[in-house]
């Protein structure tokens, strides 16, 4: 599944590149306003922080929410106390787009994450040109040399990489490239099975000074509390927010 998702994302990026060459996107990335300081926004605090996700669909659950106005949803997230907003820009299985990212960035003042299957520099320049402050890099999807190259490019453009892991080996690989924001995804992107206890098993291998993000398998406040008690500084939440009243749900989660 992960290989298919990455291949599809790269094919779609090549289609966009044919219409908007790399030199134009790179120039737009350098001309964009400076990225917001996502590490400061997500730094450890007395209470858990939330990255709230604009997510229409997923391969495992299918359609989740129509989200005709992603900017309005993002404003609700900011109003509700989210520290950052994640925007799924993958179009084939998640029904997102870079247009969603553009609209969200224009509507809110907190950091915005481009969540996609990023595997080449063109996609990173696209993210910055669209106003992203953070970019997702999935360790399982990248050879170490490419992970290092993309991490360096993300940080060189003033953004922050959320480096996603699924095992102790992947955490080590993330730390080896200098990741300051490490995510542990409870969902295995090869099988799409969930293991909510994975974060707790890996948390101690993420050193102090690196922001720890728990991803996936959040349905309610008890799940947020589970991650918080295991050492999560930040919890990334999508489905639970897009299928409920986001402001009320965020209030419950942030009370943990």
Image: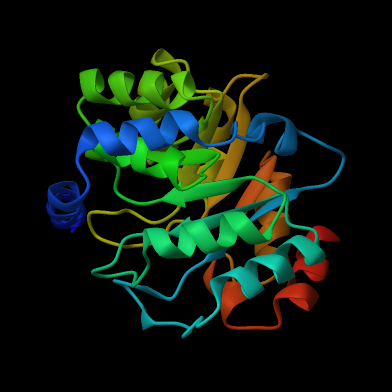
State the image quarter where residue 230 is shown.
top right
Quarter location, residue 166? top left
- In percent of width and height, residue 64 lies at 45, 82
| Horizontal side, residue 156 vs residue 248: left or right | left
Residue 221 relative to residue 238: left or right? right
Q: Is residue 150 above or below residue 42?
A: above
Q: Classify residue 210 as left or right of residue 252.
A: left
Residue 173 at least partly seen: yes
> Is any atom of residue 138 visible in this view?
no
Where residue 248 appears, as percent x and y from the top left, is: 79, 77
Task: Name the spot of residue 94 as percent of width and height, x first.
Answer: 34, 69
Q: Residue at x 25, y 31 (%)?
A: 23
Quarter of the image where the N terminus is located: bottom left
Residue 89 in the image, given as x and y percentages of width and height: 38, 59
Residue at 61% x, 24% y: name it: 210
Q: Nearer the viewer, residue 23 or 140?
A: 23
| In-image side of 221 versus 190 (left or right) | right
Quarter of the image for the C terminus: give it: bottom right
Residue at 29% x, 71% y is 59
Name the one closer to the observer, 130 or 27. Answer: 27
Query: Which residue is depicted at the point 39% across and 18% down?
Result: 152
Q: Quadrant of residue 204?
A: top right
């Amino acid at each position: 599944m992960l290989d298919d998702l990455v291949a599809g994302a790269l094919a779609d990026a090549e289609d966009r590149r044919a219409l908007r060459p790399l030199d134009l996107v790179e120039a737009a990335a350098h001309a964009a306003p400076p990225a917001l300081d996502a590490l400061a926004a997500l730094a450890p605090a007395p209470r858990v922080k939330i990255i709230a996700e604009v997510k229409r669909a997923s391969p495992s659950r299918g359609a989740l929410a129509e989200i005709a106005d992603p900017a309005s949803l993002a404003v609700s997230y900011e109003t509700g106390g989210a520290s950052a907003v994640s925007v799924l820009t993958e179009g084939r299985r998640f029904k997102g787009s870079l247009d969603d990212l553009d609209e969200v960035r224009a509507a809110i003042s907190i950091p915005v994450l481009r969540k996609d299957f990023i595997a080449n520099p063109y996609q990173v320049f696209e993210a910055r040109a669209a106003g992203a402050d953070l970019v997702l890099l999935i360790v399982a999807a990248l050879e170490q040399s490419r992970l290092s190259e993309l991490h360096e490019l993300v940080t060189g453009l003033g953004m922050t990489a959320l480096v996603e892991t699924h095992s102790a080996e992947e955490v080590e690989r993330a730390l080896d490239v200098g990741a300051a924001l490490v995510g542990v995804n409870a969902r295995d992107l090869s099988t799409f099975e969930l293991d909510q206890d994975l974060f707790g098993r890996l948390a101690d291998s993420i050193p102090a000074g690196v922001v720890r993000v728990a991803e996936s398998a959040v349905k309610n406040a008890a799940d947020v509390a589970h991650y918080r008690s295991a050492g999560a500084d930040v919890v990334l939440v999508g489905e639970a927010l897009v299928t409920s009243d986001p402001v009320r749900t965020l209030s419950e989660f942030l009370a943990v």
